[in-house]
Image: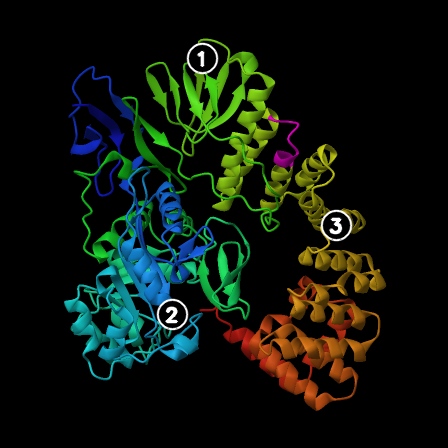
Amino acid sequence: MTVQWLDHVQLAGRDRWQQVQLTNGTVTAIGTDLIPPNYSEVLDFGGDYLSLGGVDLQINGALGMPFPWLKTTEPLPEIGRYLWQQGIDAYAPTIVTAPLAEIHTALRVIHEYAPNGQEPEAKILGVHLEGPFLNPQKRGAHPQSHLQPLSLERVQTVLGEFSDAVQILTLAPELDASGEVLPYLRQLGITVSLGHSLATVEEAQAAFDAGATMITHAFNAMPPLHHREPGLLAAALTDQRIWCGVIGDGVHVHPQMLKVLWQCAGDRLFLVSDALAPLGLGDGTYPWDQRHIEVKNGTARLEDGILCGTTVPLLAMVGRLVDWGVCDFEAALALATLNPRRAIGLTTELLGQPVSHLLRWRSPHHYERLTTSIGKITSAVKVPNPPISGNCFTLGFSTLASPPQGRQIPVAYGKLKKNSLSLQLGNCIVPKTLARLTLSLGLVLLSGSLATAQVVLPRTLELNAKEMEQNGFIVAQEALQLAQFQQFQEALARAKLAVQLAPQAQEIWALLGGLYLAVNQPQEAVPALEQSLKLNDKNPGAYFNLGSAHFRLGQYGASVRAIEQGLALKPDATEEWFNLGNAYLKLGQKGSGDRAISPLPALGSTVLASYTNIGLVLYEQGNIRQAAKNWEQAAGIDPKASEPKLALATALLKLGNEMKALQLAEEALRLDSRYGTVEFQRENLWGDRLVADTQTLLAKPPLRALLTQLQRDQSVLPPP
């Protein structure tokens, strides 16, 4: 029998630091003054928090695989391992509205999956079936063609022979005319969650009385709180039986409204990621059923702009809630770890839990899984080495080469393994993130999120040049992982170390430059990116980032030169053609701006923006009629796009059609009143002529009154 101890452990709800006994890797006792004198097998937590792992009850996919379109079990082990290493203990793979045959296939695959037990994986709790019994008016990103009416017969058809594979079913209760569905689902042991619904407060309360116990992504796909029409959300917030799931990314629900939810629902609130298949892949454009989604800064939208999910990991939301002042850390931690368990009846007891199910929290943004290795308790890295995409221009760095697998770097008395943040010094394990090696003095400076400690080694570290470079790649990998969680300052610190360890690695210099851009330090980004290109002048991403840095510094000529060099290497980089055109516009070279933007329609991915931007160029050249034709094309592609409509209205006024101009301008302002301000127009690179002429149009009495009203009434909340 092996007995180990954790000392100075902070547990939620306890005033004093606790001691935790581990017997054969399982928690067997928690209390104070329990550790025998002079006991050697002790890991000092230093006041860090200990918690269970996260539970995600709404996650649509990961690593490029959407759960609704699973055909085999092959992707599930990799997703399970990925989520486990992200700190997720268990999850409910979510199947959204889809053709019945695809729903049945996905249910069968998930139902049949059995982990092989060779590597730890996040446990599948059962499917969250989100649809197809949703109100068409609140369907959000769900395809209307596959929605189904809610009846007992239809529910039985959709569940088929896989009802025991379903843990949660989201439905709109107002569609159940018979009143038979909810009692039937409760008999099957399925948790009923209300969402994508227009239910009145009376309909919601009736559904709660019939057995519904949860609402799906509060505020989203349901009417907002209203003082005369309280609806589903108000019914849930005032009913102590009901759990409220919420997407805590700050985009789906504004932080101030997250605070409202917390103060109303309190311990009945829990976080969900609502993560889509690109989770772990970074920003970019990805397929979703027959459509495409664009992921930008962790937020996913359909091509028409409708919000459809996130790629923000569940536990990353904990730190966000704390940063926004929504609640304190203990409460935020419970929203991701304890409350989801309580919502579906899982235990929240630490006693009896394997050590590998526990997380150590050094700060709201820094957590690690615990593990045991060779009789020692250590903290494992919080994230795996995720797939690294070359399409990383949003974050500002290009593809980072992955170091060889399984490499070990000698460090003092122990080994610093590739996937470990622990350093063993004699009999003392110091679980702090390796941040800097000062070889000449034989020092290791170890920095964590809460404290900095300096440890003097008994002898100087001896690493040859190759080992130094390998170590640099390891630290760079960690920087990249932190960046994917938008922890840019911590990532930047790692990248600075990485270039010191591997000064000849152009990929790491490119990463450093991109991270400087991410924290809005373009003046520092320029020399880093130039050094990267000095080492390898064939990296288009580094050129594009260099162009971006020069643009932010107002160095438009240098921006043009850098972007053109990047486009010579990667001519299909659509966004960079835009950036090149914008840089030319800033230089005042309108014809060049026109040439830079004109290839865009042929590239095919952003036709709407192409026509809009070409119109901006033509208008500044005085070609008003041709500009109007381009804006008319853009407005036809997306009738809900405000920018081309308002620009077209301005052109029509100049062409003498004032009545049509006033009509279009009113439509545009109602879609997005921000385009009525000079600041927002200039932010979107409108030229002086267009800005002046648009202000003349907006000075017309009916538009001036409308704009004043819209700006006064404009909500501070993000769109639902």
Point out the tag, 2 or 1, that comes first from the N-terminus.
2
Q: Secondary structure at mark 2?
A: loop
Does residue 219 appear in this view? no
Please name the amino acid that badge 1 sits on. Answer: Leu
Circle 2 sits on which residue?
A: 97
Numbered badge on residue 457:
1
Relative image position of residue 175 (x, y in whole percent): 29, 81
> Of tags 2 and 1, which is closer to the observer?
2
In the rendered image, residue 17, in percent from the top left (x then y), is placed at 23, 32
Q: Identify which residue is drawn at 45% across, 57% down.
A: 310
Percent x, y of residue 431: 37, 27
Of the numbered discs 1 and 3, the one sitting upstream in the chain is 1
| In-front residue for pair 363/292 | 292
In the image, is residue 464 above or below residue 390? Answer: above
Q: Amino acid at mark 3?
A: Ile
37 sits left or right of 295 in the view: left
Residue under label 3? 563
Position above or below: 691 against 661: above
Neighbour class for label 1 at 10 Å: few (<14), some, many (≥20)? some
Residue extent of the magenta highlight:
502-509
